[in-house]
Image: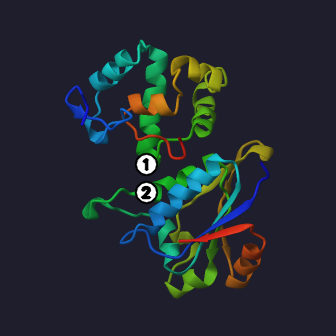
Amino acid sequence: MAQICGAEVDEEGFLVDLKDWNEDICKQMAADDEVELTEEHWDVINFLREYFEEYQIAPAVRVLTKAIAKRMGKDKGNSKYLYSLFPYGPGKQGCRFAGLPKPTGCI
Amino acid sequence: MATKKFMYLNRRSSFGTVYAIESLEVVLIAAAFEQDVSLAFMDDGVYQIVEGQETDGIGMKNFSKTFHALGDYDINKLYVSKESLEERGLSESDLMPLVYEDEDDDWEEKPSIRVVTNDELKAIMSEQDVCLSF
């Protein structure tokens, strides 16, 4: 099975054991995707991790967008902004960087 | 795509079988397709939404927390059988305070749980396009 920084990932690059996550793994995943992590990325990644901690699920994009709008304002809670940070999808790519499983209902 | 009314009927307790967690997964998937989704809890299914579940001792994921996310998914109709609660010595105050924010009412938090009699539940079921039992 493939590994990132010694942690096992599945065929789509998601961590097998969510407890393995650390910032180095996140940075490595981003580097592999040619994404340069900024403070704005970390805001979303940290948000996703908090959301998972609270609800035990990776939110669907629609739910993520709404929740970010509520927490950080409408200028950040919209899909255009979130896709500019995570071009492969704030749900799919964002959750992967955050060490979460693939969002439920995401294909 | 036309919206259909989906009801997910939950009749078993949270752990011991996969029915409860699988039902919740399917509910979230259906919600992603923006269908009219409601949940019903009867028989041992009422235990799924009891407050204060703790799973550390059994090494399972505490997915009861996920019910709090349903409001974000616009799922705000959780019908609970009054008779099933009473048969188990439970009341509405033993259940998790599940709420949703009403978009049409200045995002006011409103309760998602509605305790109904089995007769009322039967009537609600008959209005559904699809009823899935877990």
- Residue B50 appears in the rendering: no
Q: Position of residue A79 (x, y in %)?
A: 63, 26
Which residue is more in the foreground, A14 or B70?
A14
Which residue is more in the foreground, B128 or B38?
B128
Q: Secondary structure at mark 1?
A: loop
Give the residue at x 28% y 29%.
Answer: A22
Q: Is residue B41 left or right of residue B127?
A: left
Chain of residue at mark 2:
B
Spatial distance from mark 2 to mark 1, Cα to Cα?
6 Å
Q: Is residue B41 left or right of residue B36?
A: left
- Whether the residues at callouts 2 and 1 have beta carbons within 8 Å, the answer is yes
Q: Is residue A104 left or right of residue B60?
A: right
In this rendering, the answer to whether A65 lies above or below B116 is above
Which numbered dot is residue A33?
Answer: none
In this rendering, the answer to whether A74 lies above or below A52 is above
Which amino acid is tagged 1?
Answer: Gln
Which numbered dot is residue B63?
Answer: 2
Residue with the most extreme bottom position: B87
Q: Position of residue A42 (x, y in %)?
A: 43, 22
Chain of residue at mark 1:
A
Which amino acid is tagged 2?
Answer: Phe
Which residue is more in the foreground, B96 or A78?
A78
Give the residue at x 35% y 62%.
Answer: B54
User: Which residue has dot 1 on it?
Assistant: A56
Q: Are marks 2 and 1 on the same chain?
A: no
Q: Position of residue A76 (x, y in %)?
A: 61, 22
In this rendering, the answer to whether B121 lies above or below A99 is below
